[in-house]
Amino acid sequence: PEHVLCTYRVGGSNSYTDKMGVEFIPKSLYWTELLDENGTVFFSSPNFGDKVLLGKHLSMQPDAADIKSITIDDALSFSDAPDYVLGV
């Protein structure tokens, strides 16, 4: 497992599109930094099907959710680095 800092929202009503073009309403959304304070990539890019679970875990957990959507939120209006937005 790779541990990253993030913020999250459980639930919601906005629809997103998965890699196959199918719309879905995510159970949760996770925001994590795309770049660190030096402008370099913060962590390896997420991929569709990667697993996400809150908390620190030392091994894969069966209740981890698959990433279904990956978008980038620029956050420049807040003078912040871009974020990944991950929908599960």
Image: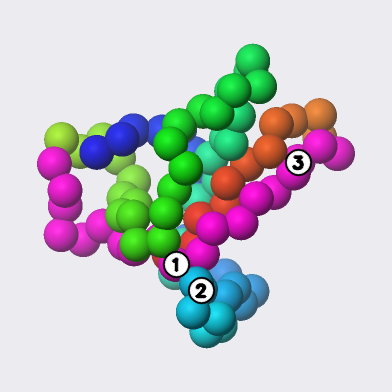
Cα separation between marks 1 and 3 = 22 Å
Please name the amino acid that badge 1 sits on: Lys
The crowd level at tag 1 (other Cα within 10 Å; few <14, some 14-19, many 20+) is many
Q: Can residue 36 be seen here?
A: yes
- Residue displayed at 34% across by 55% down: 50
Please name the amino acid that badge 3 sits on: Ala
Q: Which span of residues is magenta-colored? A: 59-77
Is residue 31 a member of the stretch shown in magenta? no
Please name the amino acid that badge 2 sits on: Asp
Closer to the camera: disc 2 or disc 3? 2
Dot 2 or dot 1, earlier in sequence:
2
Disc 1 target residue: 68
Disc 3 target residue: 75
Find residue 70 and report its horizontal and vertical position in percent.
54, 58
Give the numbered dot on residue 18: 2
Looking at the rendered structure, the secondary structure element under dot 3 is: loop
CB contact under 8 Å: marks 2 and 1: yes
- Residue displayed at 68% across by 38% down: 82
Cα separation between marks 2 and 3 = 22 Å
Give the numbered dot on residue 16: none
Q: Out of 70 and 15, give the one closest to the viewer.
A: 70
Dot 1 or dot 3, earlier in sequence:
1
